Image (spheres, grey):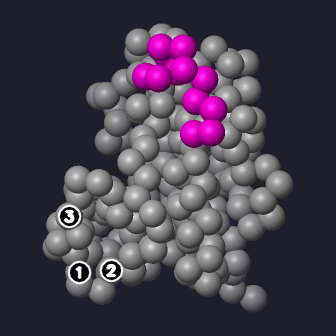
Amino acid sequence: MTLRRALLGGTFDPPHIGHLAIAQAAWEQLGVDIVTFLPAGQPWQKSNEREVSPAAVRCEMVVAAIEGIPYFEIDRREAEREGPTYTWDTIASFDGDDVVLVLGADSAARVDTWYRSRELVERTKIAVVGRPGTRGADVEAVLGPDVRWLDMPSLDLSSTDLRRLVARGYAGRFLIPDAVREVIAGHGLYSDETQQ
């Protein structure tokens, strides 16, 4: 039996309510059996930006965020892969599944900069979540006019902003799941400038 799967990839540093809301919208609107969270291993497009938290810790945060939700799961194949991770390789590794890739509009508008982007767009179903500051026309210029948009409220929330707030002493309650905040505190994350 073919498994219908939505893939939600990202750094998840940290995972927050925006990620969970997107995953829920994907599950409800795409007719999938499961939403798979894919924490990146070494996200090659972020290699010059900042020090990313260790993959094992980011996976621990995702597990904490999705605990108890039977149609959410974590897949560690990117996090455990050596070297840079590419979406094309990951999609191909889910051979046999009916896969929909879920992207924020900001990422979707840059898909043409990704490894094997043309094949990815031609062979993969993609669902897009609107993001403030990214025009639908920019996304459609890359993905084509038949983009599947997820219908959900706009949440202008980023892990970058949350890391900065945590560094300034804000606990992130209601924006970061309590179980994730416990992992952040337990590992002393985001107090170092290189992690922001």
Q: Amino acid at mark 1?
A: Gly
Between residues 85 and 192, which one lies in front from this camera angle? Answer: 192
The residue mark sitting in front, 2 or 3, is 3
The tag on residue 165 is none
Residue 77: x %, y % from top left: 62, 51
Splitting the image into 4 quarters, where does residue 15 fall? top right
User: Tag 1, which secondary structure?
Assistant: loop
> Does residue 103 show up magenta in the picture?
no
Image mark count: 3
> Label 2: which residue?
147
Judge from the rendering whether residue 148 lies leftward or rightward of residue 166; answer left or right: left
Name the disc covering residue 135, or none: 3
Whole-percent x and y of residue 33? 70, 78
Mark 1, other Cα within 10 Å: few <14 / some 14–19 / many ≥20: few
Secondary structure type for disc 3: loop
Residue 115 placed where, x, y %?
31, 58
Residue type, numbered disc 2: Val
**Label 2 close to label 1 by CB (< 8 Å):** yes
Please provide the residue range marked out in magenta: 164-175
